[in-house]
Image (cartoon, grey):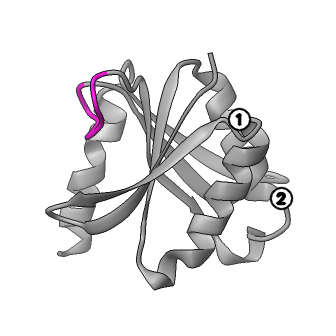
């Protein structure tokens, strides 16, 4: 896929401001990552899910020092309801799995679920769900 084609994929995030929410994560005014939150009908989730964390990325220099946890907390606090977060269940995603387990344990006081899932396009995944309303 060319860069132009990749940009086209992301255009929708700026075209649907009432249902798709892109966030730039910054540290001292320096871009550190991004988070994309989707709502129905732009989620692959069951009907009872209000918010889906479609993308969450943090640049390597900002990982492991609390920036990701704080960014996730701020994003979650903006929207109240039933959430779904997914990550690949492959071995290479162990760090992301550990991040979400710790972050959701702290944020949701341990009141979250985790279950395996599968997507025909992306393969095996872990699905985390919690409520913050």
Task: Give x and y (percent) for residue 75.
Answer: 63, 35
Does residue 63 lie above or below 20 as drawn?
below
Q: Is residue 58 left or right of residue 102?
A: left
Classify 98 as above or below 102: below
- Secondary structure of the residue carrying tag 1 is loop
In the rendered image, which quarter contains the C terminus? top right
Residue 4 vs residue 50, the one in the foreground: 50
Q: Residue furthest bottom?
A: 92
Count neighbours of disc 2 (C-alpha within 10 A) and say few if under 14, some if 14 to 19, many if 20 or more: few
Q: Which residue is mark 1?
A: 108
Residue at (26, 33) in percent of width and height: 42
Q: Which mark is drawn over residue 66?
A: 2
Q: Which quarter of the picture shows residue 11?
A: top left
* Residue 103 relative to residue 40: left or right: right
Q: Quadrant of the N terminus?
A: bottom left
Residue plotted at (73% across, 46% down): 105
Q: Residue at x 28, y 23 (%)?
A: 47
Q: Is residue 74 something that shows in the picture? A: yes
The reply to whether the C-beta atoms of the residues labelled 2 and 1 are less than 8 Å apart is: no
Q: Is residue 39 left or right of residue 109?
A: left
Identify the disc placed on residue 126. none
The image shows residue 49 at horizontal and vertical percentages of 39, 26
Q: Quadrant of residue 118?
A: bottom left
Does residue 36 lie above or below 20 as drawn?
A: below
C-alpha span from label 2 to label 1: 16 Å
Main SS of the magenta segment? loop
Q: Is residue 107 left or right of residue 17?
A: right
**Which of label 2 and label 1 is nearer to you?**
1
Q: Which residues are magenta?
A: 41-47
Percent position of residue 123, x then y: 24, 69
Residue lying at 23% horizontally and 26% vertically, measured from the top left: 41
Disc 2, SS: loop
């Amino acid at each position: 896929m060319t860069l132009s084609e990749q940009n086209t994929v992301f255009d929708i995030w700026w075209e649907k401001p009432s249902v798709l929410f892109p966030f730039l994560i910054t540290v001292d005014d320096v871009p550190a990552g991004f988070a994309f939150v989707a709502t129905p009908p732009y989620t692959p989730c069951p009907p009872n899910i209000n918010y889906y964390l479609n993308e969450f990325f943090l640049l390597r220099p900002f990982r492991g020092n609390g920036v990701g946890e704080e960014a996730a907390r701020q994003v979650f606090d903006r929207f109240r309801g039933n959430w779904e977060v997914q990550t690949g269940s492959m071995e290479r995603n162990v760090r992301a799995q550990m991040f979400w387990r710790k972050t959701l344990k702290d944020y949701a006081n341990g009141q979250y679920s985790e279950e395996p899932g599968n997507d025909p396009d992306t393969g095996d995944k872990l699905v985390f769900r919690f409520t913050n309303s």
